Amino acid sequence: MISIELILACLLGGALIGYTGGVLGIGGGLLAIPLLGLILGMDQQTAQGTALIMVVPAVLLTVRQYHRRNHIDFRRAALGAISSIIFTWLGARLALGMDAILLRRIYSVFVMAIALYYFDQSLGFSRRRRRSDKPRPDPESFGQVWYVAVGMMAGLAGGVFGVGGAVLVVPFLTSRMGYSQTGAQGLALSMIIPGTLVALATYAFHGQATWQVGIPMAVGSLMLVPFGVRLAYRLPENRLKFIFACMLVLIMALLLVRA
């Protein structure tokens, strides 16, 4: 039986994670997973499944907030979403059959790789902009197959790690397809909605989701997501990338503490 104290703690934790997820466009799951393992002692698969309970409504609200401020092309998002569904299911099945410690180590490497990329982007952002004469790619010049490929990447990462599909494809959308940081975050999150539902259903079907913890975290998350998105649009792009990288390093540290 879950205690009142734990419910309140989950509400508060979910609110802080939701705010962070709103700022960074990640749904908050990347931060929730190591915290659930470290504080509640969940194994990697259960932490990922429980985090998905919080992530689903948080992503829906975050996408709505991003769309209100910067129109998301849902036709392109749908192309990515359709391709992500089957790859999310495949990734989730792969993760559920993997040793929990091995999965956590792979997850750690994934987080660190993304963090290093964003540190490089944020610290060298202005310098590269001044030195490079190469124009920024135009998102309108990319055909449908690109969005299908992006959805495949997002789905596989989201299935294996429970969350993280949007985190993986945002750098691709910004560096290769010319999207702004906030534009990429909004598009990536809208692509992963169906896949996230598939991932949650798969983890829950295999008993790897603790609803008593995930639901109050979801309620808390929804309270502060709009404020996080509001801050995201106020921050300069290079600063937003730097904060993103620092948050990923914090996640990595939490994973190492548990290891």
Image: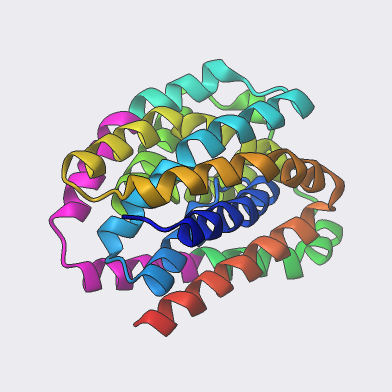
Q: Nearer the viewer, residue 193 or 223?
A: 223
Quadrant including the C terminus? bottom left
Q: Which residues are magenta?
A: 84-113
Task: Answer with left or right where residue 107 lies relative to residue 172.
Answer: left
Q: Nearer the viewer, residue 139 or 258?
A: 258
Residue 13 visible, this angle: yes
* Between 133 and 19, the one nearer to me in the picture: 19
Residue under the point 84% across and 53% down: 236
- In this image, 109 relative to 94: left or right? right
Q: Majority secondary structure of the magenta segment?
A: helix
Q: Residue at x 43, y 67 (%)?
A: 34
- Picture coordinates of residue 172 (x, y %)? 54, 47
- The image shows residue 194 at horizontal and vertical percentages of 39, 27
Q: Residue 108: x, y in percent?
A: 40, 71
> Do we see residue 162 in this rendering?
no
Relative to 95, residue 193 above or below: above
50 is higher (above) or lower (below) than 190:
below
**Residue 106 lies in magenta, yes or no?**
yes
Q: How many marks?
A: 0
| Magenta highlight on residue 93 | yes
* x and y, in percent, of residue 239 in the image: 79, 61
Horizontal side, residue 129 vs residue 203: left or right: right
